[in-house]
Image (cartoon, rainbow, N blue to C red):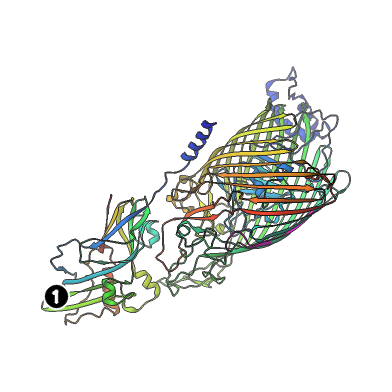
Amino acid sequence: MRLAIAAVLACAACAFDAPLAQVSFGVRAGGVLRDASMPLVVTTAQGWRVTLSAAEVSVGPMYFRNGASGVGTDQDDGRVVAEVLPAFTVDALAPSLVDVPGGGRGSTEAARNADVRLVEAEDGAVANAAGADVAVAHVAGTAERGTVRVAFDASLTLPAGGAGSDYAAALSRRVLHIPVAFTPASGGALTLRVDPTHWLDAVAFDDTGEAPDFSARAPATQLLAGVASGASYVFTWEAR
Amino acid sequence: MLKQLQSRYKTCRWGGVNRSPGQNPSERAVCPAAVVLAVLLAGRTGRAQDAPAPSDAAPAAPAPGTPAAEVTEEATVRSSAPPPRSASDTVVRLSPGLRAVPRSNASDVLRLAPGILLTNEGGEGHAEQVYLRGFDAHEGQDLEFTVNGVPMNEAGNPHGEGLVDTHFIIPELVRSVRVLEGPFDPHQGNYAVAGSAEYELGLEQRGLSMQYTGGSFNTHRMLALWAPEEGRAGTFAGADLRTTDGFGANRAARLGRAMAQWEAGLGPSTTLRLLATTYATQYGSAGVLRQDDVDAGRVDFFGTYDATQGGDASRHMVALSLEDTRGDRTARAMVFASLRGFRLRENYTGFIEDPPAAYRSGTAQRGDAVDQTSTATTLGARASLRQRGVLGGLAQAIEAGLYGRFDLVDSMQQRLRAGTLVPYRRDFDLGDTLVDVGLYADVELRPWRWMVLRGGVRGDYFGYDVLSRCDVHDVSLGAAATTLDALCDGRDRSGPRDPTARRSASGLAVQPRGSVSVGPFRGVTVSASAGTGARSADPSYIADATFVPFVRVVSAEGGIAWRREFGRTQLVLRASYFYTSVDRDLVFNQQEGRNTLAPGTVRQGVLVAGRVSNRWLDVAASATFADARFVREAADPGSTYFPADQGNQVPYAPPFVARLDGGVHGDLPIRVRGHKLAGRFGVGMTFVSARPLPYGQSSDPFFVTDASAAVRWRWIEVGVIAQNLFDARYQLGVYNYVSNFNAAASPDLLPARHFTPGAPLGVFGTLTVYLGGGAGDGAARAR
């Protein structure tokens, strides 16, 4: 009788696929790796030499899918296998990592692309600059080309330029198809580094030296193109 | 020519009778073919009893009022009763002992068959989901259901093709049920993929009985049953009314139903039966809950997210049948008609399926609730002719039959704004004209007294004429592909058009089926069965014109049964191995709120069952192990809606199910005013193992016990029923998918555990008054 019971239990056990574990993991975020004692100076695609004094972005939630990163909608990127739901603000100029409260969770399946949502900041540097629940990013500094010097201090609000539909706003806050390669595991940590190097690549600074009005459609859209570029977000995974 | 055949037939000496000395082997080879023809002609050469299929413990009841088959001097035939079609062919007549086991509805009777699990995610009036032998048969899509020969599966139901709602049946009027697990009988028609369930109605308690039931959850039920004391056994009537608040939030239900059958003799050999039923219900549904929300205390275990969920159902049916037995020939004919109303509102996913879209303003999701409605008119007929004969001193039979069914169905699925009954989108709106014409031949041959060959072939023609009344969604205009939030619009990207579209399709399924039974040898019978079955396609997929409109299943089973009598106690033990292949399966899709296409599947497993019964005891027990897996390479990628990474196991169907039904009844050693007290006690126990879920997850196992007891004195009986006697808190239906029931929060897009809870402890009292019909000194006699 015992043998029969053992056989039944063994059969029932072997009947199942290998289960996927549900795991929680830590999340840390920081700016691009650099010498923090020196200002970050970049040259944009339009030849402006920009010195950034502030570069912050508010993100969350973030989803990680199991499909190969490609084009099209998020549905083409596969199924969500990991996620970080809390919203938080990243100082892209500060290379030191900050823990994200709440962390992330997922199943033990390989993630291959990320979907980062830009969100209006409730607090933190972006909220301090633009007010709570107003902007998704804040960037300030100077841009120089030849003898022209433009000082700017911009807060990015969505939809870019204040026009457009709610749907356009919903679409514009999504940064899709960011390549990642990690399998969530308990005790591991996911690191996000935000690189603002190319945030201003598309921005057309005025040769008159007047700062762009980033509440207008064109400058806002140009700034959004940089902030919402997948290349600005780099994920790495550290196993326990 | 006919005489020659009969002559040839008579020279085939089977069944322990020696072969003719001059007969050569080639002549023997001709014999089986000759037998088939000869049996047709042998009506006057011999007569045999055409007994109904036996059960595992009790013989199947003939249809109420069926005249006893004639047994003449010539019928010196052994083993005349046909054996089961397979080792798992279960015919259970509800004995007094098994009637003592609590059953809340007619579907519960199915638990007497091995391996069956019933769940209900939709509320009291919602059809039960049936799982058996690795099949998630949903609300009947893979099981052919009939009641007194009338089909119950609903063609074109928007919740699932082939849905079966048995709630129109008063459970006390179920006299027997036959469950044949697998397509092994040519009588089995559309939907017999996992098998079939045949309900036979009847009422053995003669006279008038009236019962009141009341108890937990403010439940009240009034029941009246009547059968003439001196009239034909097939005449009866019953009606009941029921109301309950349900065992948790939004589970209130009300129903009313009536069933009546009149039986009359038309001459000495012909019986007429007229069956009429009516039923209507309205019910609330709590829907599914997320496990993490319950764990965090955001919602109660018996709570709900959306109190607008629920449904309505009605069914009105008439059936007229004639049976004529003359000599060795039995002819049966039946016509039936039914009207069915159906509405179901459910929300499985919260706020996932209505993302922001370019063609509408606002980013807030409006909610995923579906409102499925349909009205269906069904007309149909079936007829058969069975000819019995004797060959080699052994009973043989051949039968031919036909079946026709015509359904007119209007079905629609809408999406509702969260928390309201306001529709904002129409997923589909169909007018279906569906036809199923079946034809079969079935033979029963006994080459030797220890072997029976049964089987034949069945063909079914499925015809579809589907009018999609809303064939234009999300109109895309111009080169920029600007889309409009327009439904059923009279234009599309190419210009003006009619918003409707009509599609038609047809398919023909030829299904050979057969079984061989060898024995009994010292009570042991070995059997093997094989066959193919078919399920008609969902009309909503016909609109896609993606495949021939039926699903094919191939099934095989081998088994052994042992029957032994110890005095007045009968013991039956059975075991079998089964294998089933389905070329294109359906799996429940929470996003759609209905069954959608999936790859092919293979199932195999074993079952063991036993039953011991005598005059005062009846205990049936079974255990079934089944392994069900997808065969992805067999699927047409274009028709596969089931993501490839959801796992290789067919989700939801339990690998292991064990069930015990037991009851005792009889006189008690107590007299009151000179009359004996009679009592009965019944218990039902179910164990369900962990079930595979999508994405490599599994559910928790559960064990539930129900019990009842009653004492009768003369014409009055009092009883108590305990549902979930030990108040086990368990998850009856378990799912794993993505949902978001908090529209304001960042959506959690990871698959999460969802469940519908099993009912908690419920205690109900019954008071029954018997007028006439043998009331006096015991339930045993009364039954």
Nearer to me, B105 or A198? B105
- Farthest residue to the right: give it: B267
Residue at 20% from the left image edge and 66% from the top image edge: A93
The residue that label 1 is drawn on is A144
The amino acid sitting under disc 1 is Glu
Number of marks in the image? 1
Q: Which residues are magenta?
A: B237-254
- Classify the position of the C terminus of chain B by image quarter: top right
Q: Position of residue B69 (x, y in %)?
A: 82, 38
- Classify the position of the N terminus of chain B by image quarter: top right
Q: Position of residue B454 (x, y in %)?
A: 68, 35
**Quick check: B642 above or below B353?**
above
**Quick check: B235 above or below B376?**
above
Q: Position of residue B721 (x, y in %)?
A: 68, 51
Left/right of residue B383 with respect to residue B181 in the rendered view = right
Locate residue B742: give its quadrant: bottom left
In the rendered image, is residue B342 in sight? Answer: no
Q: Residues within 10 Å of mark 1 (few under 14, many from 20)?
A: some
Q: Which secondary structure lies at badge 1?
A: strand
- Does the magenta portion include B320? no
